[in-house]
Amino acid sequence: MALLNIEDIRIEFPSRRGTMVAVDGVSLSLEKGEILGVVGESGAGKSTIGNAVIGLLEAPGRLAGGSVLLNGERIDTLTPAQQRKVRGRRIGMIFQDPLTSLDPLQTVESQLVETMLVHLDLSHDAAKKRAVQLLAQVGIDQPELRVQQYPHQFSGGMRQRVVIALALCCKPEVIIADEPTTALDVSIQAQILDLLKKLCREEQVGMIIITHDMGVIADVTDRVAVLYRGKLVEQGPTAKILGDPDHAYTRSLISAVPRPDIKLKRFPLVTYIESVRTPAQPLDLATHWLGQRRDFGKRTDGPLVQVRDLSMRFVLKSAFFKRNQRTLDAVKRVNLSIGEGEVFGLVGESGSGKSTVARLISGLYTPSEGSVTFGGTDLTALKGEKELNPFRRQIQMIFQDPFSSLNPRMRVLDIVAEPIRFHKLAASEAETRRIVADLLDVVGLADRAAERFPHEFSGGQRQRICIARALATRPRFLICDEPTSALDVSIQAQILNLLKDLQEELGLTMLFISHDLPVIRQMCDRVGVMRHGELLEVAETEALFEHPQHPYSQHLLGLMPRLQSMSREGLDVVG
Amino acid sequence: MIARIAPFFTRAADSDLWHSFKRSPGAIVAAIVTLVIVLGALFAPVVAPHNPFDLASLSIMDANTPPAWEEGGSPDFLLGTDDQGRDILSAVMYGSRVSLLVGFASVLFSMVLGVTLGLISGYAGGRVDSFIMRIADVQLSFPAILVALLIDGVARGLLPRDMHDQLALYVLIFAIGISGWVQYARTVRGSTLVERNKEYVQAAKLIGIGPITILRRHILPNVMGPVLVIATIHLAIAIITEATLSFLGVGVPPTAPSLGTLIRIGNSYLFSGMWWISIFPGIALVALVLSVNLLGDWLRDALNPKLR
């Protein structure tokens, strides 16, 4: 008999507009010491299943059918009080964000001890002793000392270790980890995943890892269940699912994952996701509005963008006297140059200063030191908006979060038309509308899109609108700041394809920022590696991925999930 | 034209706001009461049985008539008359005109002032922000009614006597308006601080759009939600403030009485048994303020489900 049995469950969210079925007829089982991966894209219902198992479905959601058995015992029909005893005691939980899943007002010790006292028959002293042991077990140095500290004194990765200790403290039979590493950097992600794997083996705990990340699945799981829109499409051993999937959805999902090991010409067209009209023929720049660039100033032979000794110091705490001020050097003396028509990648972990570089180049921030030269003109020497305006048009940016980068109160037409109207790029309102319709067509959105509001679109479609807005100034240089990190892999593949096509057709120069090495490999000609505000290494993409020079680059690349076993069916490999 | 309006109504009928409205009886009753009073005030010249401002139609013979159902009452004067023979029902209708006018105008004034200062404060930050917020703090340390009294007093002192009666209404609107801007400014400043860091504002900056246009076109529409809720609740407060000032005799002149003035006039007759002169305007005032307040509370809950 399996440790945990989820049989044919159906979860509904009734509302006045009808009942939304979040999970329909899903059956899963978990053995002792086994790691089961549940994978799917946003809205597939994977977190909902996890919450249903532990009885934490958010109202008005309800379990409408099926059963959940823990060691042969039904736990879905328990009263809330009985469920509380199962939760924490027999089923431990690890949530996505270690920042919010610990109580900031209590020391780590009191949180661990409290949980143990509630669930275990332990004396206070024994619980304290066990708390220290647990911290040592999850790999925290000096556990006797650290146990007295508050959550804010731990770094993100350390905090996630504390959360794991908290999940383990009552020796649960099952642990449910909901996106346990999504909020963490790659290097910490690798450590946490190793830890989870080790603990599962040692303690003989069954674990369900809920994730959208194929890399995580490939790294740690024994078996995988693939969810699509609330339905289980496929389930089996990890190697089988990744290497030779049966279902068409799984196949397209896997082919959309950016490959770390090979460079593709473009991502295969994925079926099974939101349909997008792809323009039939490539743009003819000679006749197209986007091709009629004007007044770009003098052309120079040198690189289009030249950054010299760029530094940015943020004042964290302002004070009257300089010595009382606290500052942070977000960017330290960065030098780089980007040639016309080149795609330059910047990669680094969070806090490495890559987004700050983008904002400095685009002019959103003014650098503390150094200069940015664009097409031979020193932008940092320009005074006021008047002089900057011609350059504003040539430099555009695509942001990370498609949900906050569109004004929710404006129609798509007005959003995309704003730069055209502002810079008077069209002769009349009718022409503006025609251009907007055309731009939306270029990014693959239907004609009706212009009349609608941003909230009516999905994340991927919103990112397309952002691209259309950026193109509306007919830019020469496009900065993409993590353009796909908020999107599902299949949508990411589409957006990256679109960016690739546009880059080639329009001859755009691009600065592409990402923390995701595989994405960088697919998109960029040259790459710079950043850490703590410093640019450590710049190299041709393939050279960097095959022979990294700097130790940190080697370290980063070593952490990249290999995904060797993944199916290569239908991929369009370069070289 | 109709084709453009029709989708608005279908959208409105399908919206969560309308749905929540249909299911809260308090809000429905409050809306009906407000609507009746507002319509009565708006169409007073057409609906009211008498014109209390037409001195020629007043007769001292009708003075102090009790309500129609009391002994000595007359069906001509449903709610009785005051000491000068004015019909109370008509006076209440004309009076709520003044009350509502002062209420709406001063709320509008507060809103424009507060939202503008809040936007500037939140967007500019630094010294400008500190300066505006310290003024707000200073003003908050005085009760609103005191500020209004102060401004009214100063205006009385500055303006010549004969101009004062003409300008009394505007002075009152200004005084009540000034006393209420702080709440708007603080709320809007808070929302602006959030919105200005959103990426759509950065995108607008990258296009090259100037700060004034960014504030007007991008930030303003996104911070107006809470402002409308404050405005509804503030409307009730403004009407009460006006009534209080008028009751104290520093509000609108008795030649064009508001509800507060009517209550004050009736106040001196309360003990001689002529209760109707101040009670009926009082009831109208309470009904109006209460229902506007209830509407405001409902709106706040409906727009912010997390509060419940």
Image (cartoon, coloured by chain):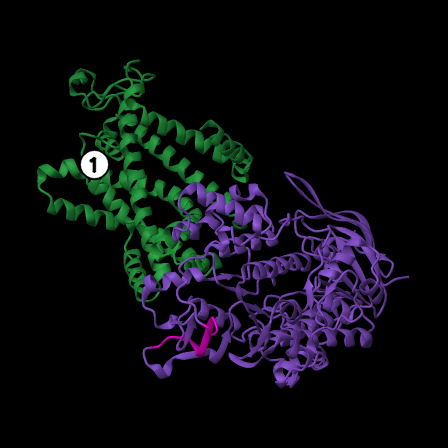
Q: Main secondary structure of the magenta part?
A: strand
Query: Looking at this view, is B13 or A459 the one in front?
Result: A459
| B88 versus A55 height, above or below | above
What is the letter of the purple chain? Answer: A
Instruction: Please state, as top left, top right, bottom left or bottom right, where the N terminus of chain A lies in the image.
Output: bottom right
In the rendered structure, which segment of residues is drawn in magenta? A301-319
x then y, percent, for residue B305: 54, 47
Query: Looking at this view, is A341 or A285 the one in front?
Result: A285
Q: Which residue is mark 1?
A: B252
x then y, percent, for residue A294: 42, 57
Residue A29, visible in the rendered structure: no
Residue A165, visible in the rendered structure: yes
- Tag 1's secondary structure? loop
| A343 versus B164 height, above or below | below
Q: Colour of chain B?
A: green
The subunit letter for the residue under badge 1 reads B
Q: Amino acid at mark 1?
A: Val
Query: Looking at this view, is A532 or A156 the one in front?
Result: A532
